Image (spheres, helix red, strand yellow):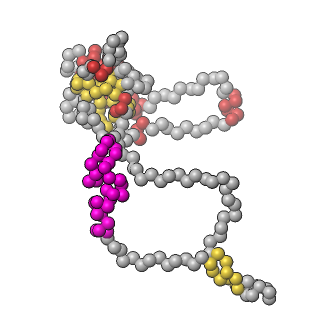
């Protein structure tokens, strides 16, 4: 909150209206000279036929709905919050070795490449070392280690973004086709050659940097786990 000291995380000393009043932005509002829109009258006069209908009649400008809901329909609350990408932690820089804590590859060590527009982290195993391909991960589910891979001036291609990982749309098969294919395993789609080439191109630069440091490839290949009596908050990664 502006000019409002926080009493606790997320709780300011002043309310939202008090903070806005103290900022005094209302004093500098720009006045527009646009003409005010003409008000639409609630009723309009129409001509009707018939000797006993008095010639004219007032009818409402906008018709009322013919049907009303039997129960009160809740209107969704309008949110003034706009989603913003998460701020990257200071311990995570390109080349940092991360430990994945969730997902299919939990326990694996990966190399951080860059942060995408959505706030997710782009990482790679590399695939040839530990089997982790190019993936997006949330930084809330990783542990940043002090080990770093010197990537030098290597930059990931701009085409590898959030849209790059979008699943292709598949046409739904007809009910007749599903009936005859019942019990048969679905044919596995081949991995796109373009993505395979992108993986090899990225891993080529990362593996070259990994091989410059002794035992780093073995470190990336080993999985992380806790034994009895080990506590992660007491460890230094």
Q: Is residue 78 above or below residue 218?
A: below
Q: In the picture provided, is 192 more to the left or to the right than 28?
A: right
Q: Is residue 18 magenta?
A: yes
Q: Quadrant of residue 56?
A: bottom right
Identify the residue at horizontal 32%, vertical 66% (top origin): 26
Q: Quadrant of residue 231?
A: top left
Residue 197 visible in the picture: no
Q: Is residue 113 magenta?
A: no
Measured as percent of width and height from the top left, residue 42 is found at: 60, 76
Identify the residue at horizontal 39%, vertical 40% (top origin): 162
Measured as percent of width and height from the top left, residue 9 is found at: 32, 41
Q: Nearer the viewer, residue 176 or 103?
A: 103
Q: In the picture provided, is 33 more to the left or to the right than 96?
A: right
Residue 171 visible in the picture: yes
Q: Is residue 170 above or below residue 232?
A: below
Q: Quick one: which residue is furthest to the top in this view?
A: 228
Measured as percent of width and height from the top left, residue 2 is found at: 28, 53
Q: Which residues are magenta?
A: 1-29
Q: Is residue 33 above or below residue 146?
A: below
Identify the residue at horizontal 43%, vertical 24% (top origin): 104
Identify the residue at horizontal 70%, vertical 34% (top origin): 176
Q: Nearer the viewer, residue 111 or 79?
A: 79
Q: Is residue 50 above or below residue 101?
A: below
Q: Nearer the viewer, residue 136 or 198?
A: 136
């Amino acid at each position: 909150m502006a000019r409002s000291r926080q009493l606790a995380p997320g709780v300011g000393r002043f309310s939202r209206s008090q903070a806005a009043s103290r900022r005094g932005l209302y004093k500098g509002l720009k006045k527009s000279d646009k003409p005010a829109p003409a008000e639409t009258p609630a009723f309009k006069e129409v001509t009707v036929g018939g000797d006993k209908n008095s010639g004219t009649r007032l009818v409402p400008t906008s018709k009322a709905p013919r049907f009303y809901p039997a129960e009160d329909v809740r209107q969704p609350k309008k949110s003034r919050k706009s989603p913003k990408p998460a701020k990257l932690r200071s311990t995570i820089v390109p080349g940092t070795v991360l430990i994945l804590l969730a997902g299919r590859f939990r326990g694996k060590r990966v190399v951080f490449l860059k942060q995408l527009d959505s706030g997710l982290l782009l990482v790679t195993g590399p695939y040839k070392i530990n089997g982790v391909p190019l993936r997006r991960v949330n930084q809330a589910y990783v542990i940043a280690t002090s080990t770093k891979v010197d990537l030098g001036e290597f930059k990931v291609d701009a085409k590898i973004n959030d849209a790059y990982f979008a699943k292709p749309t598949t046409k739904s098969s007809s009910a007749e086709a599903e009936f005859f294919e019942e019990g048969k395993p679905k044919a596995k789609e081949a991995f796109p050659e373009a993505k395979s080439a992108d993986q090899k191109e990225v891993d080529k630069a990362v593996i070259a940097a990994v091989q410059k440091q002794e035992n780093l490839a073995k470190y990336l290949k080993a999985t992380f786990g806790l034994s009895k009596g080990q506590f992660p908050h007491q460890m230094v990664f």
